[in-house]
Image (cartoon, rainbow, N blue to C red):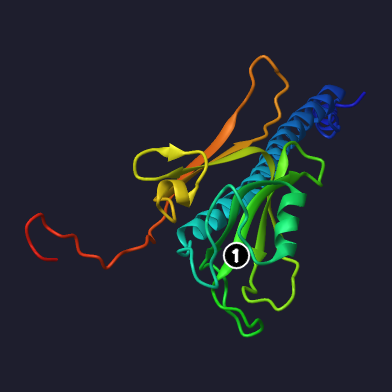
Amino acid sequence: MKPISQRHDLRSSRGFTLIEVLLAVVIFGLVIAAAHSVFYGAVSLRNKTVRMFEQTLPVEQSLTILKRDLAGMVLPGGTLSGEFSTGTVISTNSTMNSAIWSLGDLILPEFTTTTGSLDDWEPWGNLQRVSYYLTESTNQVLGRDLVRMVNRNLLPTLDEQPVQQWLMSGVEDMVCSFYDGVEWLDTWDPTATEMTLPLAVKVQILLAVENEDDRNPITDILEFVVPIPVQPSTNQVAQSSGGEP
């Protein structure tokens, strides 16, 4: 029979017990589960941020382009700019007229603006004719597409096909109002208001938003007002009641 000291050394040299191994496995599993939960949450947050960025970027770009076009509107009259009116499309380019009416609902009529980009490859100035319309979506999403039609060649010898620029999807409706100094008008007729251009244009964009609960519909409306700084002036001097002009 071995001495007590030898038996104690034998027990101390043994490996882990089954309970110790199971406890270690459980602790390791808990650590892995916590790490997985944190990693999954980080990935979900990243994907959500990317989706929100992809959705908001076209909207921000579209609003910037639309505001710049309206703020750079040119006074009607002359060879390079026609009359601004919501009732008719004033254009010498018949191809552009037919394209506007056939592709979708016209939101803003054709008008001349100073937002054309200058470069060394195209012989155009900074003036261009633009118009906005809504057309049926081509990427199978809710709502319709907002499209900008651009014509850079203002003195064409032949009818040219205007350039169509897709701006954003998911637009349920878009409404424009025009301020004449007194009230907001749904349409703009320069002959009725005796003003060639409105003092400001208000744009309301109703976005198409998915909602599983039909009892509580969601409406997301973007609204902004763009002042029209350019206005016609006159050199006529008002006469006083009893003096010379």
Residue 197: image location, x then y, percent: 44, 55
Q: Total number of numbered labels?
A: 1
Q: Secondary structure at mark 1?
A: strand
Rendered residue at 76%/35% (across/down): 32
Rendered residue at 54%/52% (across/down): 85
Residue 169: image location, x then y, percent: 70, 45
Residue 53: image location, x then y, percent: 63, 47
Quadrant (top left/top right/bottom left/bottom right) for the C terminus: bottom left
Camera-side residue: 52 or 90? 90
Residue 36: image location, x then y, percent: 75, 36
Seen as rendered, the residue at the extreme top is 215
Camera-side residue: 176 or 222? 176
| Residue occupied by mark 1 | 129
In the rendered view, does 20 fall on the left or right side of 179? Answer: right
Rendered residue at 37%/60% (across/down): 231
Q: Is residue 77 above or below residue 24?
A: below
Seen as rendered, the residue at the extreme left is 242
Give residue 129's quadrant in the image: bottom right
Camera-side residue: 127 or 12? 127
Camera-side residue: 122 or 158? 158
Q: Amino acid at mark 1?
A: Arg
Rendered residue at 43%/50% (across/down): 198
Seen as rendered, the residue at the extreme right is 1
In the rendered view, does 229 fall on the left or right side of 136? Answer: left
Local crowd size for mark 1, using a 10 Å CA cut-off: few (<14), some (14–19), many (≥20): many
Q: Is residue 138 above or below residue 30?
A: below
In the rendered view, does 114 fall on the left or right side of 131? Answer: left
Q: Is residue 29 above or below residue 199?
A: above
Quadrant (top left/top right/bottom left/bottom right) for the N terminus: top right
